[in-house]
Image (cartoon, helix red, strand yellow):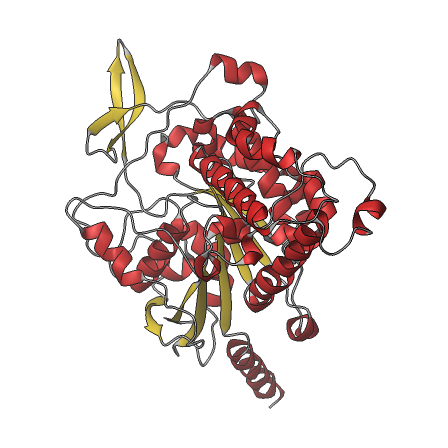
Amino acid sequence: MAALHDTLGRELGNLLERGRDRQLRLAVTGLSQAGKTAFLTSLVNQLRHAGVEARLDLLPAARDGRLLGARRLNQPDLGVPRFPYDPAMQALRDTPPRWPDPTRGISELRLELRYRPARSGWLRGAASHLTLDLFDYPGEWLLDLPLLDQDYYQWCQTRPFDQGEQRREVFAEWLAAAEALDPAAEADEAVLAELAEAYAQGLRRAKQLGFSQLQPGRFLLPGELEGAPVLQFFPLPHLSKPREELEALPDSSVYATLATRFRYYQKQVVQPFYREHFRRFDRQIVLVDVLGALNAGPERFEDLSRALGELMQSFSYGKRSLLRRLFTPRIDRLAIAATKADHVTPDQHDNLVTLLNSLLKEPLKDLRFADVPVKALSLAAIRTTWPREVNQGKTRLPALRGTTLEGEDVLVYPGDVPAALPDAAFWQRQGFDFPRFRPMPEVSGALPHIRMDAAIDWLIGDKLT
């Protein structure tokens, strides 16, 4: 009788455990061009084809045949657009295939995953389910989260518009005009609007050149705020007067007007975005285009490092409990992924992860100190190349075969990935040429990938046991 009682207790505990926490909210985070849309498209595609065509050997629930698949559900928030999965898949199936349109606003998608739990017992054959909410948003908007920890004076002091030769050139015209402004002078609305547009043009040019530390992010993708006064502000360069003197200026002054708009932007644009979206997440993956930064050169590679360092401080990490879940939501598991791993040969993948760890060394220290589970990996959400070998004398060298964005079929060795942060001497003796490839033609069924199964396992695998 006691044995039966113990067995019933274990089974009841298993049942209660399966019934708890059956919803997971996953944020896909990354700066512009890091591959968020491709990752989300592939994630949905792999889960939809689990148990059929999808190759998910690194996900135990799929490898063991316990993951039965996924279906899309109606999303809970009718005011948020649905993630455009079907248009994204259509783009990949076009002739010639093309990449899906980048994210230009907030979207979400809800999936129901069905699986058989791995536990033994009376209910081992019963299928269970997990509701997975996926969130997408422009990487440009993400850049604004660090603004919540600054006031206008601090923001002016920390803007890198004149750090490095290339940045100075991009912002030269705006900088000359902004430096001529007297912070104590009466604000002229037309002049401020003109300078704000010049600053926004500088941000857009910097983005095209591959820079990452670009604020305010809404200047790049203003959406419904285009033309509004809330976007007509900019940093005042090289402030020489003490903070107390500047903050005592009349409300009609240049400094006070810009500071007021900055505060309004914080409270009415950035805070609602953070409160309504980021504070609800359970899990997060941060996508980083390390190869793109290497291609762009040392100044932009260092810029990516600074931008990521600022960004990582904006998220709330920590183990979840019932009280924290109700009052102080926190992300309790994090993945950091170097994307586009298919743009280098497989022998360089380990170096890519090592370099990613070096790039995020300080934020990773803080995460580990906070005992937040974090995993770094390299992946290709949608694989575009296949590894090959070429003969060079008596030596066989690794290479990649793929089709460039311009439609040229190539067999190339893109180059070595440094295993540590490149120093000045390294940049002088070695350049990088990691070409961009178009998707493979005739995509049907599950999309080809590299280590999407490892990412899925880290992010949701513990919920499928």
Q: Tell me residue 273's x, y (percent).
A: 56, 63
Measuring from the top left, give residue 134's x and y in whole percent. Answer: 44, 64
* Residue in the foreground of this view, choosing between 347 and 296: 296
* Res 84 quadrant in image: bottom left
Which residue lies at the image location 19% right of the left edge and 30% below the top edge? Answer: 408
User: In x, y percent, where is residue 27?
Assistant: 50, 59
Say which of 155 and 329 sits in front. Answer: 155
Q: Is residue 27 above or below residue 322?
A: above
Q: Residue furthest top?
A: 393
Whether residue 297 is situated above or below residue 57 in the rendered picture: above
Q: Observer-nearest residue: 37 or 365?
A: 37
Asked if residue 220 can be seen in this view, the reply is yes
**Residue at (62% x, 29% y) in the render:** 163
- Residue at the image position 71 percent from the left and 34 percent from the top: 238
Which quadrant of the rendered structure holds the N terminus? bottom right
Q: Residue at 64% across / 43% down in the picture?
A: 235
The residue lying furthest to the bottom in this view is: 1
- Camera-side residue of 351 and 437: 437
Task: Give the tally of numbered discs.
Answer: 0
Quarter of image, res 46: bottom left
Q: Is residue 121 above or below residue 161?
A: below
Report x, y in % for residue 318. Answer: 67, 59
Image side of residue 417 versus residue 8, left or right: left
Q: Is residue 420 visible?
A: no
